[in-house]
Image (tube, grey):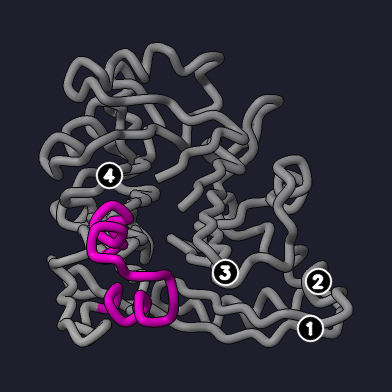
Amino acid sequence: MEITFLGTSCMVPTKERNVSSIFLRFKGEGILMDCGEGTQRQMNIAGIKRTSVTKILISHWHGDHVSGIIGLLQTMGNDMEPPSLIIYGPKDTKKRVDHMLNTCIFDNKVDLEVVELDPLESEVLRFVDREEYAIECARLNHGVPCIGFSFIEKARLNIDTEKQKALGISDGPHLRRIKKGESIVYDGKTIKPDDITYEVPQKKFTYIADTEPCSEATLLAEGADVMVCESSYSSEHQDKADSHKHMSAKDAAQVALQADVGKLVLTHFSQRYKTVDALEEEARVYFPETVAAFDFMKLKL
């Protein structure tokens, strides 16, 4: 799992920071979490092919989180073999995607599917469940329909090569069955998964978009290896955070602490801050494993 930050500013882009977008790559999946204006250009700089995007997860429909979608669709549709794409978002996403497609004159050639997500209060909704990964969401509290997301790489069995060598088992398709948790018969002996494998634990990445602190953010992020969380303000401007239903760095750190995450990454910074050092320092008082994101920052899990 590799995460690239394509935009870490709040509503207004700055010279150093574009507006919101995160790209997550996992094997054949390319997942955009939000797609603000200028995301295509950021993808160019980061070396991410536009047609590698297979899913877009929209947190909410404020312009700084979605206004790059229409251009991305046009570019993707211009490929020799236009790809398939699924857009997931909160209630009314289908209507808003239709409106967006009608704002420009172009023939949409992307095989596009739109799925609306409406998790209940205090619910973590698993809406994608594959053999190797799952994606979950929960509602946030931003004054408009808004959701956060978690990407989970599931725990899996892997071959212990030392045990394999000691048992005299050669490489081959039979190892795939063992890794699926099945016993096999090899040279007349029954080999159980426990005899030759070890478990690789699950990895979890959580994206908490625009919201005030809420119990659902904590539920969604529970046990995450990495939680990326909006941190629009420092607590010096807590009144602005509260009035606009955003978080301060202190708020984000307290959510991370309550959710028992491994690492907190702050993002979505107000343009009022020339540097975000003070926000990072503030969060570290409450949650030491904190860093402030910057455009083109990469994380591997």
Label 3 packing within 10 angstroms: few (<14), some (14-19), many (20+): few
Could you give the CA–CA distance between mark 3 and mark 1, rounded to whole angstroms?
Answer: 23 Å
User: Which range of residues does the magenta coloring cover?
Assistant: 156-180
Depth-wise, is mark 3 or mark 1 nearer the camera? 3
| Residue in the foreground of this view, choosing between 129 and 155 | 155
Mark sitting on residue 28: 3
**Residue at mark 1 to residue at mark 4: CA–CA distance:** 38 Å
Q: Is residue 295 above or below residue 214?
A: above
Amino acid type of the residue that numbered disc 1 sits on in the rendered structure = Asn
Question: Is residue 172 highlighted in magenta?
Answer: yes
Q: CA distance from mark 3 to mark 4?
A: 22 Å
Mark 3, secondary structure of its residue: loop
Q: Is the residue under label 4 in contact with that under label 3 (CB below 8 Å)?
A: no
Q: Which of 114/13 is in front? A: 114
Q: Earlier in the sequence, mark 3 or mark 2?
A: 3
Residue 278, horizontal then vertical, whole percent = 38, 12
Query: Upstream in the sequence, badge 4 or badge 2?
Result: 2
Instruction: Give the residue pinned by disc 1.
Output: 108
Query: Circle 4 sits on which residue?
Result: 225
Q: Nearer the viewer, mark 4 or mark 2?
A: 4
Camera-side residue: 252 or 170?
170
* Disc 4 packing (10 Å; few <14; some 14–19; many ≥20): some
Q: Residue at 79% x, 83% y: name it.
A: 108
Q: Residue 39, percent across and down?
A: 68, 50
Location of mark 2 (residue) = 74
Q: Amino acid at mark 3?
A: Gly
Distance, label 4 to label 2, CA atoms, is 35 Å
Q: Mark 2 belongs to which amino acid?
A: Gln
Q: Is residue 229 magenta?
A: no
Q: Do callouts 1 and 4 mark residues in contact (Cβ within 8 Å)?
A: no
Q: Secondary structure at mark 4?
A: loop
